[in-house]
Image (tube, rainbow, N blue to C red):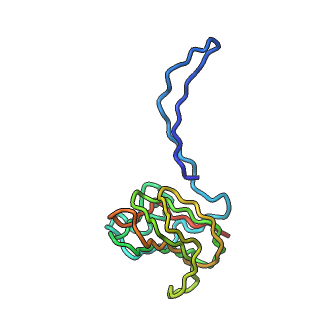
């Protein structure tokens, strides 16, 4: 899911003659975890910081893979989305820009004061690109807490999708 594939086409006739390759085409499969409903799109999102006016938190859940949220150039930055009600959260898709997090957590909460968070996922080996996470937990608020950056920039997500029921 969420992976770009590039392909070319060649033809071969009965005599074994092979044509030159066609122009390369790249297609990207749709994001998704294969289970659950997309709950986060268009919901209120906010973050610890934004790099500038064009990288606001709502860009991470607008369904547009050409817009992104980016944090200030610091560790320990987060983005939080309000699902509107408490849901069972079965999957999270993170579509990272080049500025990704190597150490991060995905957390869930029902606490409107955000005093309590439960980890849905935790890693110190984040690799960027698109990460499809299978999760099990329940809550209204889901956040990505980037604890360590991969680059001197902040962390940046083209899309942050929460799936569940
Ligand atoms: Ca976007």
* Residue at the spot 60% in from the left edge and 19% down from the top edge: 12
* Residue at the spot 52% in from the left edge and 46% down from the top edge: 4
Where in the figure is residue 48, as x and y percent of width and height? 40, 76
Q: Judge from the rendering whether residue 60 lies leftward or rightward of residue 72; answer left or right.
A: right
When asked about the image quadrant of residue 155, the answer is bottom left
Where in the figure is residue 67, as x and y percent of width and height? 42, 58
Q: Judge from the rendering whether residue 155 lies leftward or rightward of residue 37; answer left or right.
A: left
Where in the figure is residue 139, as x and y percent of width and height? 61, 79
Task: Please give the count of numbered marks on the rendered protein.
Answer: 0
The correct choice, above or below, for 110 with respect to 11 in the image is below
Of 69 and 147, the residue lying toward us: 147
Quadrant (top left, top right, bottom left, bottom right) of the C terminus? bottom right
The correct choice, above or below, for 5 with respect to 13 in the image is below
* Residue at the spot 51% in from the left edge and 88% down from the top edge: 115
The correct choice, above or below, for 139 with respect to 130 in the image is below
When asked about the image quadrant of residue 120, the answer is bottom right
Q: Judge from the rendering whether residue 104 lies leftward or rightward of residue 99; answer left or right.
A: right
* Residue at the spot 56% in from the left edge and 68% down from the top edge: 40
Where in the figure is residue 52, as x and y percent of width and height? 31, 67
Residue closest to the far front = 124
């Amino acid at each position: 899911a969420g992976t770009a594939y590039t392909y070319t086409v060649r033809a071969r006739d009965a005599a074994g003659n092979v044509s030159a390759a066609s122009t390369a085409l790249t297609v990207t499969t749709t994001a998704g975890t294969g289970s659950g409903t997309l709950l986060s799109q268009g919901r209120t999102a906010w973050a610890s910081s934004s790099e500038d006016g064009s990288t606001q938190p709502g860009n991470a859940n607008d369904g547009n893979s050409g817009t992104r949220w980016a944090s200030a150039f610091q560790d320990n930055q987060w983005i939080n989305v309000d699902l509107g009600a408490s849901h069972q959260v079965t999957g999270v898709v993170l579509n990272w820009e080049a500025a990704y997090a190597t150490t991060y957590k995905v957390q869930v909460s029902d606490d409107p004061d955000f005093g309590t968070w439960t980890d849905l996922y935790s890693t110190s080996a984040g690799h960027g690109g698109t990460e499809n996470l299978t999760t099990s937990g329940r809550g209204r608020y889901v956040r990505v807490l980037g604890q360590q950056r991969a680059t001197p920039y902040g962390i940046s997500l083209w899309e942050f999708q929460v799936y569940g029921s």
